Image (cartoon, rainbow, N blue to C red):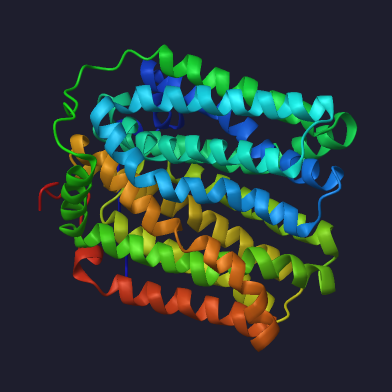
Amino acid sequence: MAVDIERIPARRRRPGDRLAVLGERDFRWFFLGYTTSLVGSSMAPVAVAFAVLDGGGGGTDLGWVMAARILPVVLVLLAGGVIADRLGSRGVMLGSDVLRGLVQALFAGLLAAGHAPVWAMVGLVAVWGLGEGLFMPAFGAIVPRLVRREESIADANTLLGLSRSVSTVVGPAVAGLVTATQGPAVVLLVDAVTYGAGALALAGLRLPGRVVADGGESVLRELRAGWSEFAARPWLWITTAQMGLFNLLVWAPFLVLGPLTAQRGLGGAGGWGLVMGVYGVGAVLGGLLMLGRVPARPLAVASVAALGWALPSGALAAGASLPWVAAGALVAGFGSAVCGTLYSSTTQRWVPVELLGRLTSFGVLGSFALGPLGLAVAGPLAGRFGTDTVLLLGAVWQLASGAVVLGIPAVRNRRWDDDPED
């Protein structure tokens, strides 16, 4: 199926004009603070992992610490959406940054003092995850309020996606170097400082006033109302379901079984680092391509781009050499940037701002709730059926599900300039 792309008018097609959204004061201020915070956040997981291992912990201890971060995110997402719609997204995000900064500073202090048992790490990362779960729905709701023109929403999301892509390349590399030379406590202290930068940026925003919910209704009733709105939009719940099953069947097995496959025949940690680094490069390139472009059928474009995620899993399952696996990762990273930008932009374009927090929380929860299960069962399933079989199943699923979603009119025919209420 041919997918057309409508570009923003020629006056905005010059390279400098594609970055015109940075000329908007609130977005520029937020972008700088968010990017700074992202770099610190992408460094922290490396430091936490080595803090556990250097402290004498093993794989089980590390698993508990990592799970302690993910579980609170899943549990608090829905409440976070209601809170963002009630209180306003900026205040929720600012509080989240302050909370996470304090957690990381305390974590760094315990490590520096040599008093960081595993139970303390579990408790700290659980609070860290709580802050993330509050931040995510509020983030989805604030972006449209940072720009003045509707067509700038896509550019704003593209630039924010580029920040995430670049941070996934830069952050872990810097964290590895600093952890090896200075220890994990320094990395976590840096992360705490970057959260402070994010909070300062949020505090400096001059957002237009908006009416927030008065809190008269119960949280449960507001969640039910949000779910009704979510379910009434087929394009939203269909793409959310596809993303949730992708994380269960494709991405989680790839993250678990990919390193094992690399250890056996792709050069070990160095080879796997190359694959993930190339994935990040692909994401940066995809983000750059999206600058200044608005697809006529954004969900169709996103669904086509998502097909690329089948390539690295398929290459691993086929026993391909490292260059071919890296090439597949490049395409997948490219597609991830396109999908992320378009899914965020369409949601913010077609969902009323007073519902964005709740509907974003349902979308994020549906997309990622099955991810931890996929991470847990990938290894046992590979032991039962074979690594190649599990990876191949994921690749085939991605292609088949993409074809099915593209065949659904609510996704395929939805246009950027459609009435948001349709």
Q: Nearer the viewer, residue 107 or 364?
A: 107
Q: Is residue 282 left or right of residue 199?
A: right
Q: Position of residue 44 (x, y in %)?
A: 68, 37
From the top left corner, tell me how far across and down residue 82 is, in percent. 27, 38
Asked whether 373 or 137 is in front, the reply is 373
Q: Residue at x 33, y 28 (%)?
A: 89
In this rendering, is residue 248 above or below 166? Answer: below
| Residue 257 visible here | yes
So how many labels did they put on this image?
Answer: 0
For this rendering, which residue is in front, 317 or 249? Answer: 249
Name the quarter where the N terminus is drawn.
bottom left
Q: Which residue is drawn at 23% across and 40% down?
A: 219
| Relative horizontal placement of residue 48, taking residue 285 as reference (left or right) | right
- Image point 17% across, 29% down: which residue? 213
Q: Does 62 sit above or below residue 36?
A: below
Res 86 quadrant in image:
top left
- The single residue placed furthest to the right in the displayed view is 181
Q: Quadrant of residue 210?
A: top left
Q: Observer-nearest residue: 117 or 350?
A: 117
Whether residue 417 is visible: no
Percent x, y of residue 393: 54, 82
Residue at 80% over, 44% down: 50
Residue sitting at the far bottom: 385
Q: Where is residue 283 in the image (x, y as percent from the top left)?
A: 55, 49
